[in-house]
Amino acid sequence: MTKLTKPQARKVLGIPPKGEFTLEMLQSAWREAAKAAHPDNGGTDEKIIKVNAARDLLQPMAVETLAEPKATTKRKPKVAKSTAVLTISPEGHLFGESDQYVGNCRSVAAAIAYCAASGWSYRQSSELTDGQRRVLEAG
């Protein structure tokens, strides 16, 4: 049998012709190629010898793990901090200063999350004020 080159070895095992590969990738490729080339599965002695030689040739080139691709740093938009404090009702309604209705988040937890994501300060109230009640009734 003639000696394999590295490109031929990659081809025998089905490893891409360029780029790094891990030891785990090499072992997996070898197992698949060995199953197909083994004499018990319809292959020949020559084929299994070639598959094993390809594995042995490429093993020193394998890396432990592939480097993680560099994450592109997406900058989060800066949230304008407000000096106003929103009031969260027990039902999840949001009110600004002077009982100005901001919206309904349907739950206190959702309202808190909205305030945190938006950069608003908040306080929770245990019940609606008369002004807040009038605003909700009018709407």
Image (tube, helix red, strand yellow):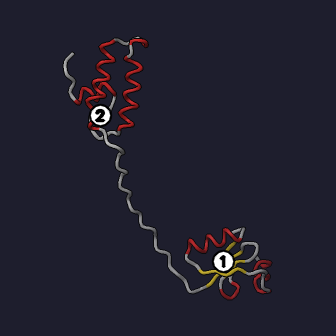
Q: Residue at x 64, y 80 (%)?
A: 122
Pointer 2 local density, CA inside 10 Å: few below 14, some 14–19, many at least 20: some
Q: Position of residue 13 (x, y in %)?
A: 33, 27
Q: CA distance from mark 2 to mark 1?
A: 64 Å
Q: Position of residue 71 (x, y in %)?
A: 38, 57
User: Residue beneath label 2, please?
Assistant: 59
User: Residue beneath label 1, please?
Assistant: 102
Q: Secondary structure at mark 2?
A: helix
| Amino acid type of the residue that numbered disc 2 sits on in the rendered structure | Gln
Q: Are marks 2 and 1 in contact (CB under 8 Å)?
A: no
Total labels drawn = 2
Say which quarter of the image contains residue 85. Answer: bottom right
Rendered position, 71 above or below 122: above
Say which quarter of the image contains residue 94. Answer: bottom right
In the image, 119 versus 17, the foreground residue is: 17
Q: Position of residue 31 (x, y in %)?
A: 40, 26
Q: Secondary structure at mark 1?
A: strand
Instruction: In the displayed orientation, state which residue is furthest to the bottom.
Output: 98
Q: Quadrant of the N terminus?
A: top left
In the image, 134 versus 66, the foreground residue is: 66
Asked if residue 83 lies left or right of residue 88, the reply is: left
Q: Position of residue 65 (x, y in %)?
A: 36, 45
Asked if residue 68 lies left or right of residue 83, the reply is: left
| Amino acid type of the residue that numbered disc 1 sits on in the rendered structure | Val
Rendered position, 107 above or below 62: below
Q: Residue at x 80, y 78 (%)?
A: 137
Q: Residue at x 80, y 86 (%)?
A: 130
Q: Residue at x 27, y 38 (%)?
A: 61
